[in-house]
Amino acid sequence: HAHEARPFYQSAKQRFEDAGFLLEAERTTAAIYLAGYSVECMLKALILSITPERERAGTLSSFRGAKAHDYDWLKARYFERGGPDFPSAVSKSFALVNTWTTDLRYKAGTSKRGEAEAFLRAAQEIIVWADGRL
């Protein structure tokens, strides 16, 4: 697989693990933020893994700016590169996590525990599926 994908893959796995620790510590907003970030990183790893080698540098360069944090933009890049459709469970999980935004960095306070748990379950569904594709 593409060596350019490895840092995104490793970051996705580590940030999701961090999100679990934060959830257990009742730091629910931070848990959601990191779980969402892990989904973003996993999408980038998937995109790079199916991008021809000659196009990877340009693809990496495109991962800058606000659009590169947008799941819809990332999913479009994945499908453009010939990625297969998501299984229905993964599509449902994306519908739940699609509320994620980098603006969570600035949200004080805590999110409801149940919302955070649901978000992490959905993120995990996506990550496990993507992991099986890499």
Image (cartoon, helix red, strand yellow):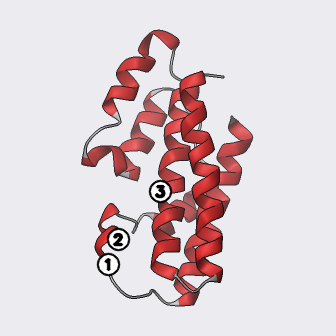
Residue 28 location, x and y as percent? 51, 81
**Label 1 secondary element:** loop
Residue 123: quadrant of the picture: bottom right
Residue at 40% over, 18% down: 57
Locate the C terminus and report the quarter of the image it occupies. top right
How many residues crowd mark 2 within 10 Å: few (<14), some (14–19), many (20+)?
some
- Are discs 2 and 1 less than 8 Å apart at CB? yes
Q: Which residue is mark 2?
A: 104
**Label 2 secondary element:** helix
Q: Earlier in the sequence, mark 2 or mark 3?
A: 3
| Amino acid on which the number 1 mark rests in the picture | Lys
How many residues crowd mark 3 within 10 Å: few (<14), some (14–19), many (20+)?
many
- Are discs 2 and 3 less than 8 Å apart at CB? no
Residue at 61% over, 60% down: 16
Q: Earlier in the sequence, mark 1 or mark 3?
A: 3
For this orientation, the residue located farthest to the top is 54
For residue 37, which numbered disc appears in the image?
3
Q: Which residue is mark 1?
A: 107
Residue at 56% over, 30% down: 5
| Above-or-below relation of 77 to 24 | above
Let me know if residue 54 appears in the view: yes
For this orientation, the residue located farthest to the left is 65
For this orientation, the residue located farthest to the right is 132
Residue 54 location, x and y as percent? 45, 9
How many residues crowd mark 1 within 10 Å: few (<14), some (14–19), many (20+)?
few
